[in-house]
Image (spheres, rainbow, N blue to C red):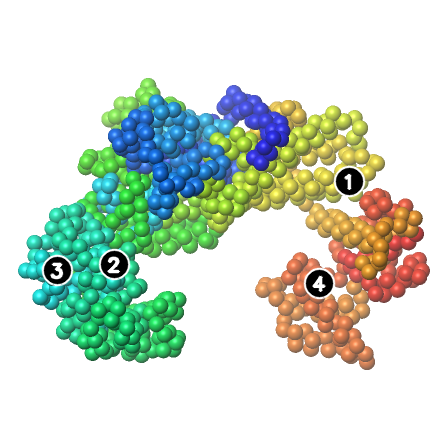
């Protein structure tokens, strides 16, 4: 077990032995093989579930396991119920990460030798290695420390690829082979299969495959899909802005990124603010050229109100050649983006003519487009960012709180001006120019909000950020232009018109950059490039409508998931589907490009249905004895998947063609696809789009179930901190079933779940102890009560099993596996333990225990299948396999009996507390030593089974004034008025009774919120005296009493039995559900 260093691992090892044996049984019985039946399946007769194939640049880890465990549990539940279940699994090798890692190894060998001798770090401090940029690559083992330089530590943790490979336990000789990217494809997928089999995944392994052109069968499928989309006009070649890796020389899609997934290009208008000559000496080399300070803005409509331009005094800038005549002054980072957007004299290589600082630029006179001021000046602003935009910022103090306060500070503080060499004439003459009417803050909105919020300087960041949000939102959506050609027009309408005018007059250019920092898996910072490549036209109106229709018909299991898809459909636009670096399938009509990794994984669920016929169980497609890849023409794929005509020219035998078509028609559509929620914004939505385009409606996806990420022991799972486990490590550490148990217990829904090592260790103990208990019970069969169940405890236990069968079925069917674990295991175990205590000397009933072992084994089978299979075959000696044994039968639960038993157990608990308090004496006593001689031996339980008098009247009024539809009561005044009109309201002592009624009414209203409307019943749905009397022996045994009497509180003779303690019945009178106990010597 994980934290038991130095302790015995015998229990864990016992589970591992069982798992090994059970997996052999499953293999012998081929229990997870799934074949289509001759007749189409009726509702519930088949289940086809799948999981996004994991990327094969490392071992599978618990993050993968958490997501696919949801699919595994769902599939196992349907298999147990008797459905024909298909759970296939494949491995993704398309894209950049493998090639990038292979190239890193090559570079490391070139730089440091083979095996590489890495440079010795001189200045050291303790830290953990990072490795986050390596996809699924993992570093086995617990937390560990490494040595690295302060520079490396600050950079986020650099780890050589060779060291990552060493962490897998590979020799230097073996690592060198990974410089060939195709070696990864032969190394990791087979290991993943081993791990998944050890996990107990109920997979039909005949259907497994890898992607890329290494597998010629899957390659033809992807080519068909791409040609299909192109024929429909859904793939076009165009110039588009895309996140781009300069190092890789191609667009960097979500799955190609080490960080920045989901980040898209942010488009700006770049305002060309011309520097008026003569230039200062530092810029003399630029004389004769048109030099512009290039300011990136999202609000071109505000340019009328410019009073100056801002730069960061100590910021680093450069003068970069844009073409033969124009020079832009901006940051190097912005210049690099421009160079990839065809705005550099040398494409993709920014040319810096002069390096400058912000201080060098202060005081430059500028002529800026649209500005009413003929000349404005460059001034210092301390909050200018150089990692966003261009580092050059226009100043519009009428509508920007930041600009207003920065200009105010310069005007009001001569010392501030002097510090940066700012002359008075560059600042003091410039006043606010009203350009937009804000509905709430007038014509000078920035000035007004700064005054109202009492902002004193440009350093009050929180206040300024809040003010900016208010002004920008109101100004854009509800503001009106006061100046220019579009006076009187709404700002949001005028914006695009003003922008277009600036672009037409060549006073501005379009500029894009990543909205946040993006690092590719090759380790370089990405830019936005204007790329001429192939795009899938997601977001096109008609296609989007079909995707929305598809989504509307799907089961998504949570509204949060549905909202996520709806949001993605609202913004998703054209997607670059081609790459020229990495592994994959070639674009059929333009083979210089590869299909990118999120575009070859949108329809492949259909391929699972025929993969076993095509590849005959070889994941690489090397077995070509059945069908040859070149025989898989578009006509064949059309026939199989989209109701195309029979391919008469095909050389594939008719029997095989019809067999594959039957397989597809039987299994499709898939019923469930399980995935992490992060794939909603790309892969899963692409899946919807592609099915809506290519597949007929009756083959559109049935459902997606999305989950959050997994934490380990309440901390983020991270390779860099060492808080990490591969699937293989988890199985070795806890066993497969204890790992599965903890994954089920980790949580469902969209929130991040928590895998707790303590839970896994506890599962080891629970499962092994349960095996031992069953062995003991089976060995002691002759000592059990072998008669029909007759006692109260028998009935309760049988009822608890019925409840478990029904509630667990509901939880499994809704894919709420944590709840299924609770109702099908924890609650059932508690019921068994309670039954053991309740039976006393009479002993437990043999038939009920055999039923319990059967029911519990089946209910836990989807989550802990090895454990369940072992019990099924070895202990219970049942035929067949538990994994498809059928759902246990159960009678309708008796909810009244359930309530009666809860009442009994609660009563015992409350009486035990009262008795212990009586024995120990009051808290005020000087001594707390138990007086054994004075221990009570007689218990009197007084019961009042029905409310009467004023309480009865109050409950009737509450019943009358309760709205079941809204679960709310009428206002208190209305209830009080009803009380005054009632019989007790007319009595002479009503004021005294009212003092008692009001707290009771409040108590009962609160109780309704807690337990439901049954709190207003005048009596419980069972006889309290009968339940307590029938269980007198149990109560006596539990409380250590010799005698026990159950008495009616409304029987005067019974009350007399209390003797001197009768006052207790007045101070604590019994009521329905709350008996009063008195203990006597």
Helix, strand or loop at mark 2? loop
Quadrant where the N terminus lies?
Answer: top right
Left or right: 890 with respect to 351?
right
The residue wearing badge 3 is 283
Helix, strand or loop at mark 1? helix
Precedes in sequence: disc 1 or disc 4: 1
Distance, label 4 to label 2, CA atoms, is 72 Å
Distance, label 1 to label 4, CA atoms, is 33 Å
Callout 2 crowding tier (Cα within 10 Å): few <14, some 14–19, many ≥20? some
* Image location of residue 288, percent across then percent down: 5, 60
In which image quadrant can residue 186 be found? Answer: top left
Callout 3 crowding tier (Cα within 10 Å): few <14, some 14–19, many ≥20? some
Numbered disc in front, either 1 or 4: 1
* Residue drawn at the location 28% of the way across and 62% of the way down: 384
Callout 4 crowding tier (Cα within 10 Å): few <14, some 14–19, many ≥20? many
Precedes in sequence: disc 3 or disc 1: 3
The residue wearing badge 2 is 315
* Residue drawn at the location 22% of the way across and 63% of the way down: 359
Numbered disc in front, either 4 or 3: 3
Q: Is residue 466 visible?
A: no
Numbered disc in front, either 1 or 2: 2
The residue wearing badge 1 is 837
Q: Nearer the viewer, residue 884 or 159?
A: 159
* Residue drawn at the location 35% of the way across and 43% of the way down: 152
> In this rendering, is residue 201 above or below 972?
above
Precedes in sequence: disc 4 or disc 2: 2
Left or right: 700 with respect to 10?
left
* Image location of residue 1077, percent across then percent down: 84, 56
């Amino acid at each position: 077990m994980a934290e038991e260093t130095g302790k015995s691992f015998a229990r864990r090892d016992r589970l591992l032995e069982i798992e090994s044996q059970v997996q052999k049984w499953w293999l012998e019985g081929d229990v997870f093989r799934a074949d289509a039946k001759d007749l189409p399946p009726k509702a519930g007769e088949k289940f086809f579930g799948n999981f996004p194939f994991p990327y094969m640049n490392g071992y599978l880890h618990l993050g993968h396991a958490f997501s696919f465990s949801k699919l595994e549990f769902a599939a196992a539940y349907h298999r147990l119920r008797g459905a024909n279940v298909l759970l296939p699994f494949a491995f993704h090798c398309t894209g950049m990460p493998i090639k990038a890692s292979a190239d890193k190894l090559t570079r490391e060998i070139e730089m440091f030798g083979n095996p590489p001798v890495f440079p010795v770090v001189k200045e050291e401090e303790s830290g953990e290695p990072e490795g986050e940029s390596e996809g699924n690559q993992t570093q086995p083992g617990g937390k560990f420390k490494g040595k690295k330089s302060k520079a490396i530590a600050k950079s986020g943790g650099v780890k050589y690829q060779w060291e990552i490979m060493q962490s897998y336990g590979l020799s230097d000789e073996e690592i060198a082979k990974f410089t060939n990217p195709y070696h990864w494809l032969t190394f990791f997928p087979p290991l993943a299969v081993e791990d998944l089999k050890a996990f107990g995944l109920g997979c039909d392994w005949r259907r497994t495959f890898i992607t890329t052109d290494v597998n010629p069968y899957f390659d033809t499928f992807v080519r068909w899909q791409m040609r299909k989309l192109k024929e429909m006009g859904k793939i076009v070649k165009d110039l588009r802005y895309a996140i781009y890796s300069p190092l890789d020389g191609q667009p960097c899609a979500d799955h190609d990124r080490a960080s920045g997934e989901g980040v898209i290009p942010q488009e700006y208008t770049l305002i060309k603010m011309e520097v008026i000559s003569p230039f200062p000496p530092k810029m003399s080399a630029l004389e004769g050229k048109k030099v512009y300070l290039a300011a990136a803005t999202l609000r071109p409509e505000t340019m009328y109100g410019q009073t100056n331009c801002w730069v960061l005094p100590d910021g680093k800038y450069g003068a970069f050649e844009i073409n033969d005549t124009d020079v832009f002054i901006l940051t190097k980072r912005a210049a690099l983006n421009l160079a990839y957007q065809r705005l550099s004299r040398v494409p993709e290589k920014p040319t810096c003519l002069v390096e400058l600082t912000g201080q060098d630029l202060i005081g430059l006179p500028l002529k800026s487009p649209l500005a009413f001021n003929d000349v404005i000046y460059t001034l210092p602003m301390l909050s200018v960012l150089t990692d966003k935009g261009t580092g050059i910022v226009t100043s519009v103090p009428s509508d920007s709180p930041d600009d207003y306060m920065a200009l105010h500070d310069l005007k009001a503080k001569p010392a501030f001006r002097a510090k940066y060499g700012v002359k008075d004439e560059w600042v003091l003459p410039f006043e606010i120019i009203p350009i937009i009417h804000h509905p709430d803050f007038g014509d000078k909105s920035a000035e007004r909000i700064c005054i109202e919020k009492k902002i004193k300087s440009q350093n009050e960041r929180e206040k300024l950020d809040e003010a900016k949000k208010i002004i920008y939102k109101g100004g854009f959506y509800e503001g009106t232009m006061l100046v220019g050609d579009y006076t009187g027009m709404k700002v949001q309408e005028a914006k695009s018109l003003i922008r277009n005018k600036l672009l037409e007059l060549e006073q501005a250019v379009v500029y894009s950059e990543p909205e946040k920092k993006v690092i590719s898996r090759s380790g370089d910072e990405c830019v936005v490039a204007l790329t001429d490549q192939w795009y899938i036209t997601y977001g096109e109106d008609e296609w989007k409508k079909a995707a929305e229709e598809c989504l509307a018909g799907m089961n998504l299991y949570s509204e949060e998931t549905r909202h996520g898809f709806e949001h993605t459909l609202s913004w998703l636009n054209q997607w670059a589907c081609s790459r020229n670096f990495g592994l994959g399938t070639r674009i059929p009509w333009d083979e210089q490009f590869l299909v990118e990794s999120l575009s070859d994984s949108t329809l492949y669920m259909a391929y699972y249905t025929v993969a076993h016929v095509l590849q005959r169980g070889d994941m690489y497609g090397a077995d070509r004895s059945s069908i040859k890849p070149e025989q898989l023409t578009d006509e064949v794929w059309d026939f199989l998947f989209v109701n195309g005509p029979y391919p008469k020219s095909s050389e594939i035998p008719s029997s095989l063609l019809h067999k594959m078509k039957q397989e597809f028609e039987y299994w499709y559509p898939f019923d469930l696809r399980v995935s992490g929620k992060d794939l909603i914004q790309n892969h899963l939505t692409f899946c919807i789009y592609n099915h809506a385009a290519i597949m007929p409606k009756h083959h559109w996806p049935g459902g997606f179930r999305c989950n959050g990420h997994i934490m380990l022991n309440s901390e983020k799972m991270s390779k860099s901190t060492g808080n990490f486990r591969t699937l293989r490590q988890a199985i070795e550490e806890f066993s497969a079933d204890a790992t599965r148990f903890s994954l089920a217990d980790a949580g469902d829904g969209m929130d991040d779940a928590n895998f707790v090592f303590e839970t896994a260790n506890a599962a080891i103990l629970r499962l092994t102890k349960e095996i031992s208990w069953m062995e003991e019970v089976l060995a002691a069969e002759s000592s059990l009560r072998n008669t029909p169940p007759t006692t109260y405890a028998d009935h309760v236990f049988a009822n608890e099993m019925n409840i478990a069968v029904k509630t667990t079925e509901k939880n499994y069917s809704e894919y709420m596996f944590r709840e299924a674990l609770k109702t099908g295991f924890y609650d059932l175990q508690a019921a068994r333990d309670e039954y053991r205590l309740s039976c006393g000397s009479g002993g437990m009933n043999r038939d009920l225990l055999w039923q319990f072992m059967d029911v519990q084994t089946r209910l836990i089978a989807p989550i802990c299948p090895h454990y369940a299979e072992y019990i099924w075959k070895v202990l219970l000696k049942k035929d067949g396999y538990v994994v498809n044994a059928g759902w246990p039968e159960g009678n309708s639960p008796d909810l009244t009996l359930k309530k009666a038993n809860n009442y009994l157990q609660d009563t015992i608990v409350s009486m035990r507390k009262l008795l212990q308090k009586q024995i120990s004496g009051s808290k005020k006593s000087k001594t707390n030593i138990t007086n054994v001689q004075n221990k009570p031996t007689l218990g009197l339980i007084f019961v009042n089974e029905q409310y009467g008098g004023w309480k009865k009247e109050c409950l009737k009024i509450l019943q009358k004034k309760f709205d079941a539809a809204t679960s709310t009561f009428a206002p208190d005044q209305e209830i009080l008025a009803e009380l005054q009109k009632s019989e007790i309201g007319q009595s002479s002592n009503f004021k005294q009774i009212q003092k008692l009624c009001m707290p009771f009414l409040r108590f009962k209203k609160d109780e309704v919120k807690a337990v439901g409307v049954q709190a207003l019943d005048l009596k419980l749905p069972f006889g309290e005296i009968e339940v307590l009397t029938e269980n007198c022996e149990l109560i006596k045994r539990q409380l250590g009493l010799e005698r026990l009497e159950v008495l009616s509180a409304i029987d005067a003779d019974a009350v007399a039995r209390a003797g001197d303690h009768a006052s207790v019945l007045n101070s604590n009178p019994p009521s329905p559900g709350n008996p009063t106990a008195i203990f006597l010597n």
